[in-house]
Image (cartoon, grey):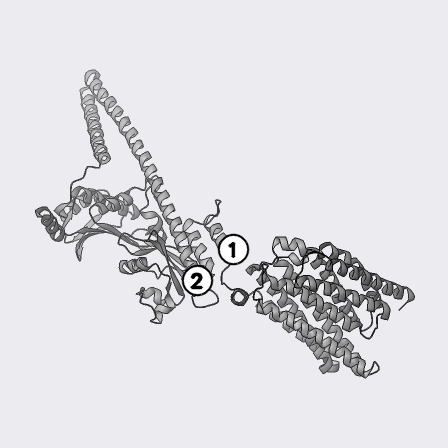
Amino acid sequence: MSSMLQFLGDWGHALAAALFAALAVWVSRGQGSGAERRLLVTALGMTAFWALYAAFSGMRGAFLGISECLRNAAWLLFIFALLHRGEGRQTAHPRAVTVIYGVLGILLALQIGIALYAMEIGRDTDFFVTALDTVKVLRMMVAAGALLLVHHLFTISAPEGRARIGLLMAALVAMWTYDLNLYALSYLSGGDVDELFALRGIVMAFVAPVMALSARAAGGGRLRLSRTVAFRSLSLVAVGVYIIVVAVIMMGIDWIAGPYARIIEIGAIFFLAVAVLGLVPARGLRALIKVQVAKHFFQHRYDYRAEWMRFTDTMGRPGEDAAPFDQRVIKAVADITESQAALLMLPSESGGLVLQASWNWSDSGVPVPAISASDAAAIESTGWIVDLDSVRAGKSDYAMPEWMLADRNAWALVPLIHFDRLAGAILLARPLVDRKLDWEDFDMLRAAGRQVASYIREAQGQQALDDAQRFDEFNRRFAFIMHDIKNLVSQLSLLARNAERHADNPEFRADMVLTLRESVGRMNEMLARLSQHNRMTQEEPRAMPVSPIAERVVRTKGKAHPVEISGEGVDAFADPVRVEQILGHLVQNAIDASGSGAPVIVRLGRNRDCATIDVVDRGCGMTAEFIRRDLFKPFSSSKAGGFGIGAFEARELARAMNGRIEVLSRPGEGSCFTLFLPLAAQNGGHHHRERAA
């Protein structure tokens, strides 16, 4: 080493020793007490001792490596104390991070042991050279591990804690980064990098003032461990462990393989790189790591603040490109358990639950209804989350549908309860890392289910309000139309009178008068029908035969398109006017959907306690999504210029008579609308008994 480097090395380390000693005295006289402050003073004092020893003994002092190990140990104890204090109180520390501190402590002890043994046997032995290389590798490992722990400490600190310890952590990063590069270059070059050893004292002299800026407040840093930071820090630790493992493997190959070491090292590095590149992007591995982090680093599985913010962000995401409401509902709940698919089911007219929407789940195997009325009532009465694996194992009393139990991907059923009423249910698929549901899952899903139920009820209420407003506008339009038609009728009547009085040609006049009178008659008939429709005057249900009404509708509609009737009708308990209106809507829709030569079939029959009328076409058919979302929605029409009222009005008229309409349809195969009406024999007798009572 040149005299200039010797001068810089000696006086640089001496300056650093003086600065760190002064800093230790300054911090020890500061206000406050506690283990963190004492450890900080100890770390500063050990750094001063190490720098002073380096200044007096030079770069090859016998105990220089041991003093450096003691310095590193003191700083690791200090940052461990900060990490261990957590939110300002003594708490159980994450085991995985504690293990890393322990491993670094073992490496420091191993360095001291090797250094003492090497001094015992002397410098002129082969073991000394090997020991020197081993110590360099161990020092690289300690420096890399210490940098990872400093990063971990800083990233999990609360914002106020970061402000206090930020500069101190930056100084430690500078110290250990310099050490890592120093020993890495020394090991790779196979010689002594005297320049870097000499300049380390000057670097440490610059580090001391940086530490002084934050050392007094360093003991006040408060830590808040988050799952995101823990996962990222663990990933960083894994990278560091990977580097250390590679370094150890390379060193072992150098010792064992001899002249073939270079080829084996290249092959080993290639294999490890391919293995890492293949495993890291895997979603299953990432999900497994997250589960293990939540399991071993935290008392609770969920970060409730983060989950709530993600939930509200998913539900209330604005913008035109946002997903539909049903999709947001499903995803908000599925994201909690990291389920990869889910189904949303809402109540139907019969009291059961029918499929409303799906997310990453094929709904082709879901029947109608998806959950029967009795099962839905049982779910509503308890409000419990259904663990389907427990049901399959016979450990639960719930009677779930067979299709749900047969699908092994179905994992949990979350009821959506709103004011003790069932607003729907969400079926969750298994997460990537399969696990059993526990009490925390149940609590989290129950709270999310109630919140989702309120969102659904609010959306349904808003939809009902919108429909009412549109109906009001629809009625106002009819009033305007009626007024215009009245004016037109008056004009046509006047024209007819003038034509009778002034036409010169008797034949033309007679034909003109006849045409105008027919037009006036049609207009008056339209006015009468519109007025009656607007007043919604209907008769009370009574026993009535179904066949004559069906035949009349078939004759009327059959003039424009082939319509056939089959089956035997029974007596129903209904209003003939409303039944004719329903059949008129259904048959007309079937005609509109059919080709020019494809007949529409009207089939009469009976199903248990109901009279049935099927309207079948072989038209384009409808998707399950359209049937669920749009078919019976008012003002939603697939026909150009259509009001979208026919199917909605038909369903409402059927409901008013205690009936219902069910639909079966497949795209490209046609549709079958079935009108169910109460039988006259049962309802009529019941009606007479009520009147007699």
User: Splitting the image into 4 quarters, where does residue 25 fall?
Assistant: bottom right
Residue situated in front as seen by the camera: 143 or 241: 143
Q: Which residue is depicted at the point 79% across and 67% down?
A: 49
User: Splitting the image into 4 quarters, where does residue 475 fall?
Assistant: top left
In percent of width and height, residue 587 lies at: 24, 46
Mark 2: which secondary structure? helix
Q: Amino acid at mark 1?
A: Ala
Q: Label 2 vs label 1: CA separation?
A: 15 Å
| Mark 2 in CB contact with mark 1 (< 8 angstroms) | no
Mark 1: which secondary structure? helix
Mark 2 Cα-neighbour bin, 10 Å: few <14, some 14–19, many ≥20: some
In percent of width and height, residue 275 lies at: 60, 71
Q: Is residue 619 visible?
A: yes
Q: Amino acid at mark 2?
A: Asp
Side of 551 where 600 appears, left or right: right
Mark 1 Cα-neighbour bin, 10 Å: few <14, some 14–19, many ≥20: few
Residue situated in front as seen by the camera: 291 or 72: 72
Which residue does the numbered mark 1 point to in the structure image? 306
Side of 162 where 139 appears, left or right: right
Residue situated in front as seen by the camera: 122 or 245: 122
Q: Which mark is residue 4?
A: none
